Image (spheres, helix red, strand yellow):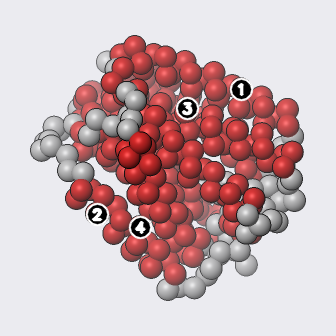
């Protein structure tokens, strides 16, 4: 019992360690030293988690094949960005950490990219698709593990548009890991998804930094379209990657800490959603 409580305490601490530098790094105009400080702390945290996980389950770190490495992002990136597009269409001002700092240049964005596209995926995948999914699977079964780890991962992002973005990716990556996939593949897919705003900036699509998230389409037809495409792709991925039959009940010894975790993250998400609507013109 005490080990489960220690696990949730570590997961909550890790989420906060990730959440603060990640949100500040995107939403505010932070300097080079702040970015490097946050990135260094997160990197150390991620490597410590990875070292412990490798000792207990080295198969998670097997070398993936090239087809496997490139195939997963072809599912997860379109799904996550379709769901984010639906959120942007529903919320007139769905500002969040999908927007880059306004007016930033290469000098500011390059260290930010290192943190967001390299360090954050390593730490998040080790925590959510490694430790957390593994613990859920051991106590609650493989299907519950995929959904619960995806929801905790999504709600930890707090900001409304980014919650849907993370949920879509979390379901794809969790399903892949539950079928014996490698964390290196999900880290790579995560890095590609987080690099997309930087790629758009480099190509000149979003030179002012905030255009990607601050001026989305408010067409009511766009939201169900993006949502439908995202859900359809998720359905096809689930059909192509079935899980074994599993009817393991939710472990009673984990119910209270799980409930507290989801309630806390849910309240933070609700607060962010209310703030978003109040900021709408």
Seen in the picture, residue 59 relative to 153 is either above or below; the reply is above
Mark 4 → mark 2, Cα distance in angstroms: 10 Å
| Structural distance between the alpha carbons of marks 3 and 4 | 26 Å
Tell me: residue 39, above or below residue 227: above
Which residue in the structure is indicated by mark 2?
A: 236
- As drawn, is 91 to the left or to the right of 130? right
The answer to whether the residues at label 3 and label 1 have Cβ atoms under 8 Å apart is no
Please say if 240 is above or below 245. below
Q: Nearer the viewer, mark 1 or mark 2?
A: 2
Q: Nearer the viewer, residue 11 or 178?
A: 178
Look at mark 3 in the image and give the residue it sits on: 123
Residue at left offset 63%, top offset 21%: 44
Left or right: 156 as drawn, with respect to 247: right
State whether residue 196 is above or below residue 112: below
**x then y, percent, for residue 180:** 28, 35
Q: Quadrant of residue 62?
A: top left
Distance between mark 3 and mark 1 Cα atoms: 11 Å
In which quadrant will I find the C terminus? bottom right
Q: Is any atom of residue 63 visible in this view?
A: yes
Q: Any mark on residue 230, and which? A: 4
């Amino acid at each position: 019992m005490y080990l489960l409580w220690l696990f949730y305490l570590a997961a909550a601490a890790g989420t906060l360690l990730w959440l603060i530098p990640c949100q500040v790094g995107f939403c505010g105009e932070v300097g080079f030293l702040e970015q490097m400080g946050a990135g260094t702390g997160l990197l150390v945290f991620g490597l410590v988690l990875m070292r412990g996980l490798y000792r207990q389950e080295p198969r998670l770190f097997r070398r993936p094949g090239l087809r496997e490495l490139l195939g997963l992002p072809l599912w997860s990136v379109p799904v996550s960005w379709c769901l984010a597009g639906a959120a942007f269409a529903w919320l007139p001002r769905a500002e969040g950490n999908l927007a880059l700092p306004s007016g930033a240049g290469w000098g500011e964005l390059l260290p930010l990219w290192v943190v967001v596209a390299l360090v954050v995926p390593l730490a998040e995948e080790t925590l959510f698709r490694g430790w957390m999914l593994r613990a859920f699977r051991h106590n609650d079964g493989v299907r519950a593990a995929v959904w619960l780890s995806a929801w905790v991962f999504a709600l930890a992002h707090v900001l409304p548009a980014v919650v849907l973005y993370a949920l879509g990716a979390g379901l794809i990556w969790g399903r892949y890991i539950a079928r014996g996939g490698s964390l290196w593949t999900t880290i790579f897919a995560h890095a590609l998804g987080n690099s997309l705003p930087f790629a758009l900036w480099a190509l000149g699509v979003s030179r002012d930094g905030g255009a990607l998230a601050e001026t989305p389409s408010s067409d009511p037809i766009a939201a169900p379209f993006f949502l439908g495409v995202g859900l359809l792709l998720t359905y096809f991925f689930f059909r192509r990657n079935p899980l074994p039959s599993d009817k393991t009940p939710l472990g009673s010894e984990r119910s209270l800490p799980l409930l507290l975790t989801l309630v806390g993250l849910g309240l933070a998400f609700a607060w962010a959603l209310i703030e978003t609507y109040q900021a709408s013109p």
